[in-house]
Amino acid sequence: MMRTKTSAKDLLMRYTPVAIALSLLAATSSSVLLSQPPAQLDPRASALLTEGHAAAAAGNLNGAIDAYESALTVEPGSVEVLLSLADATRRQGMQGKALHYYRVTLASDPRNVVALAGEGMALAEKGATEKANRNLARLQTLCGKDCAETRTLATAIAKGPAPRMVTADAVTPKTAVSEN
């Protein structure tokens, strides 16, 4: 039996699938090994967060925002605190401030469905339905149409923008002259 010399093409075709499989295994295992578990909240921040939740449940949004902001100073960048603060400011009617907190959260975790839904609701309440629909489409790809956040955002978009407050400067009184 005569043996022929193996060409470079044959070697490439034989060992490429094995090399790709080994590199994927190494990449997956190294990313799993290097990932960190979620950090625990500082006990002071946790107590302030609980206080904020209680105030929000009682309808005291100003007290809740104060507690959440205090928790944010103790635990800066905490996703849980930022989301609670964003929700409270959105419920109080400060959609611009809420959008800031949602976007800070999304900068650190772009796949956070709660932040995406909250940002979409704040946008819908401001009247930016096109941008809110983009968030809805992104949510549908991340968690599907049956996800609670997707349904909540779809309802907020269907509801439309929140009624705007009229300031005293915007209203001009009608002057009426009457005799005594």
Image: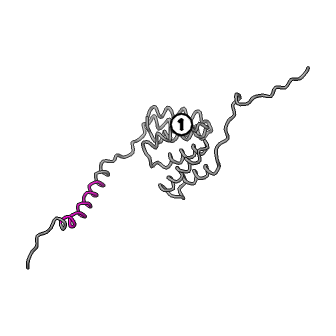
Label 1 sits on residue: 51
Is 16 covered by the magenta stretch? yes
Which residue is depicted at the point 70% across and 30% down?
170
- Residue 17 in percent (x, y) is at 25, 64
Q: Residue furthest left?
A: 1
- Residue 21 in percent (x, y) is at 26, 61
- 101 horizontally vs 15: left or right: right
Residue 62 in which image quadrant: top right
Which residue is depicted at the point 23% across and 63% down?
16
Number of numbered labels in the structure image: 1
- 143 horizontally vs 159: left or right: left
Judged by its main secondary structure, the magenta piece is: helix
Which residue is depicted at the point 62% across and 39% down?
58
In what quadrant of the picture does the N terminus appear?
A: bottom left
- Residue 90 in percent (x, y) is at 58, 40
- 10 Å crowding of disc 1: few (<14), some (14-19), many (20+): some
Q: Is residue 43 above or below residue 180?
A: below
Going by the numbered disc 1, the residue's amino acid type is Glu
- Residue 151 in percent (x, y) is at 57, 54
Is 110 covered by the magenta stretch? no
In what quadrant of the picture does the C terminus appear?
A: top right
Which residue is depicted at the point 65% across and 49% down?
159
Secondary-structure class at tag 1? helix
Q: Residue furthest bottom?
A: 1
The stretch of residues the image draws in magenta is 11-28
Residue 91 in which image quadrant: top right
